Amino acid sequence: MIFEEKIIITKSDNQTQNLGFKFSKKITPPAAICLYGNLGSGKTTFTKGFAKGLGIKERIISPTFVIVREHEAKKSLFYHIDLYRIENEKELKKIGINDLFLEKKAIVLIEWAENLDNLLPKKRWDIKFEQIEKNKRRITITSNF
Ligand SMILES: Nc1ncnc2c1ncn2[C@@H]1O[C@H](COP(=O)(O)OP(=O)(O)O)[C@@H](O)[C@H]1O
Ligand SMILES: [Mg+2]
């Protein structure tokens, strides 16, 4: 069941970061946030603002090669995951993604959540990113709980 759906159009990198910042204020651990959308659609940009909102000062970069980056936030542990290069469920299990979803203090944000397949947690936020013009993005936020 979908309890909430919001569509936001952003017109700059900055607006997308601000949206991430504001969204972070709604989130308390444990939480799973699944980001969908093509390369360059704004997932990491959103995540930068989101992390800032959690009080994280470290630089946020796409963890494409390491797959998971852990950042200590004020009241949570923030796991930033990028599944761009994940090929199958076996690799996902190796990362221990299931265990992360069970951590009480964890806020888990996943770029390329398309690749989660059967491991998508039931209770989660889904955020879809679409590029509609060079600097314009349509961002659709839904909660599944
Ligand atoms: N409205 C916008 N929202 C987000 N990014 C934008 C926007 N307009 C332009 N951009 C640019 O698009 C790119 C988005 O890249 P990124 O956030 O890394 O995407 P992804 O993580 O989805 O691959 C950045 O270079 C950013 O500056
Ligand atoms: Mg990215």
Image (cartoon, helix red, strand yellow):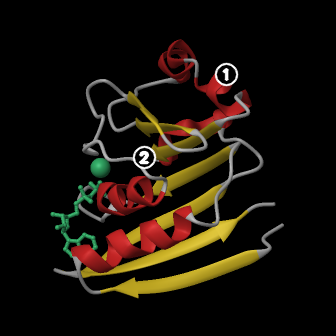
User: Which quadrant: the N terminus?
Assistant: bottom right
Position above or below: 57 against 98: below
Label 2 amino acid?
Trp
Query: What residue is shown with label 2?
Result: 112
Q: How far is disc 1 from disc 2 in space, using C-alphas?
A: 19 Å
Decide which of tag 1 and tag 2 comes sooner along the chain.
1
Q: Nearer the viewer, residue 54 or 14?
A: 54
Q: Which residue is most to the left?
A: 134
User: Which quadrant: the C terminus?
Assistant: bottom right
Position above or below: 93 against 20: above
Q: Is residue 74 left or right of residue 30?
A: left
Residue 76: x %, y % from top left: 59, 40
For numbered disc 1, what is the local secondary structure?
Answer: helix
Q: Is residue 133 left or right of residue 53?
A: left
Rendered image quadrant of residue 24: bottom right
Ligand 2 within 8 Å of disc 2? The answer is yes
Q: Which residue is most to the front?
A: 74
Q: Are marks 1 and 2 in contact (CB under 8 Å)?
A: no
Q: Which residue does the image show at 51% across and 46% down from the upper left?
A: 109
Which numbered disc, 1 or 2, marks the residue closer to the eye?
Answer: 1
Q: Which residue does the image show at 66% across and 79% down from the upper left?
A: 5
Label disc, if present, on residue 99 of the rendered structure: 1
Residue 37: x %, y % from top left: 39, 60
For numbered disc 2, what is the local secondary structure?
Answer: loop
Q: Nearer the viewer, residue 52 or 100?
A: 52
Label 1 amino acid?
Asp
Residue 45: x %, y % from top left: 29, 61
